[in-house]
Amino acid sequence: MSERIFERKVVKSFTGKKEKQDYIRGHKFKGNEKRVKELTDAGYLEKVDIPKVEAAVPDNNVETADQLKHVGGGYYELPNGERVQGEENAKKALAEAGE
């Protein structure tokens, strides 16, 4: 899994020792969570709560996924051969056909 990148507003100009770049007040700084926290604690970046990421909940509706076939361009083919645009519309149409 890739590391999250955070962007914060510079509130006090500085030269990044690790980044080897000048950051001017009002510009944006991008970095990983550890570096952003370090610079925020030192007073160089605006203080913003860093949100915690919840683990993604997988779609447990495997039966529906097996019945839908993505045919490109945002279209899905239902088991009866009908094509529907949009995954949500396709799932809805599949549910209605199953009733």
Image (cartoon, rainbow, N blue to C red):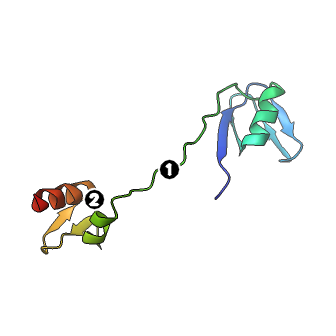
In the image, is residue 87 above or below residue 47? below
Asked whether residue 48 is in view, the answer is: yes
Placement of the C terminus among the 4 image quadrants: bottom left
Label 2: element kind: helix
Disc 1 element: loop
Residue 85 position within the rendered picture, expressed as x and y whole percent measured from the top left:
21, 61
Locate residue 38, reporting x and y percent: 82, 34
Given residues 90 and 22, the one toward you in this image is: 90
Q: Can residue 69 be spotted in the picture?
A: no
Q: Is 91 left or right of 39, judged from the image as shown?
A: left
Residue depicted at 79% across the width and 41% down the height: 35
Instruction: Please name the residue that numbered disc 1 is placed on.
Output: 56
Residue found farthest to the right: 17
Mark 2 highlights which residue? 87
Residue drawn at (19%, 54%) of the image:
92
Type of amino acid under label 1: Ala
